[in-house]
Amino acid sequence: MAAISPTPIPRADLSERLRSHGIAPTHQRIEIANALFSRCEHQSADQIMATVNLHHSETSKATVYNTLRLFLEKGLVREVIVDPSKVFYDPNTAPHHHFYNMVSGELTDIPADSLQVFGLPTLPVGMMTDSIDVIVRIRPQF
Ligand SMILES: [Zn+2]
């Protein structure tokens, strides 16, 4: 399932990882980064908060959301918006696509080179393609 995701990052290396993205490594930020990078799975903010609060029940929802926003702005994680009520945080920032299982709610990676997009319309004048993210929504046949 996480075949192309990056390998987990040990807690001891997280401070350096945060610093390398211009993020001051506070205790809470390291806990939140650890929830993301120790498993290297797609998680919602609520799942991340639940993981952090297994050990640190004082971490508020606002702190988790603000920290995830900071991680996003600094390019430490990427956001996958399946729909406005289903937002996942992805520790794999390399280009790739996703399957979204509409029944189980699970998001899994599709390697970037296993999917090609044809027939893009002409871009507006002065614009270039920055990235294309595809979410293939799947469900059991029966
Ligand atoms: Zn992913």
Image (cartoon, rainbow, N blue to C red):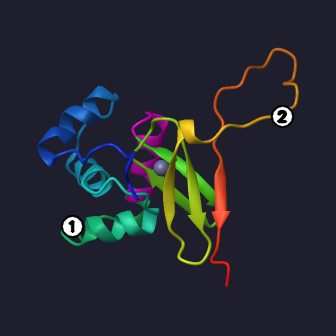
Q: Secondary structure at mark 1?
A: loop
User: Would you identify the image quadrant in which residue 46 lies?
Assistant: bottom left
Q: Is residue 86 above or below residue 128?
A: below
* Residue placed most toward the observer, 61 or 6: 6
Q: CA distance from mark 1 to mark 2?
A: 49 Å
Residue 124 in magenta stretch = no
Residue type of the residue flagged with mark 2: Gly
- The dominant secondary structure in magenta is helix
In the image, is the residue at mark 1 within 8 Å of ligand 1 by its beta carbon?
no
Q: Earlier in the sequence, mark 1 or mark 2?
A: 1
Q: Which residues are magenta?
A: 64-76
* Residue 65 visible, this orientation: yes
Q: Which residue is at the front of the view, 5 or 87?
A: 5
Residue 79 drawn at (x, y percent): 53, 48
Q: Position of residue 89 (x, y in %)?
A: 46, 53
- Taking the spot 43% from the left edge, 58% from the top edge, the residue there is 42
Q: Is residue 100 above or below residue 89?
A: below
User: For mark 2, what is the residue?
Assistant: 119
Is residue 66 part of the magenta span, yes or no? yes
Q: Is residue 66 above or below residue 101?
A: above
Q: Is residue 10 left or right of residue 69?
A: left
Q: Which amino acid, mark 1?
A: His
User: Residue placed at 21% from the left, 41% from the top?
Assistant: 14
Residue shown at the point (43%, 33%) measured from the top left = 74
* Between 99 and 47, the one nearer to me in the picture: 99
Label 1 crowd (10 A; few <14 / some 14-19 / many >=20):
few
Q: Is residue 108 left or right of residue 134?
A: left
What residue is shown with label 1? 56
Q: Position of residue 28 (x, y in %)?
A: 25, 53
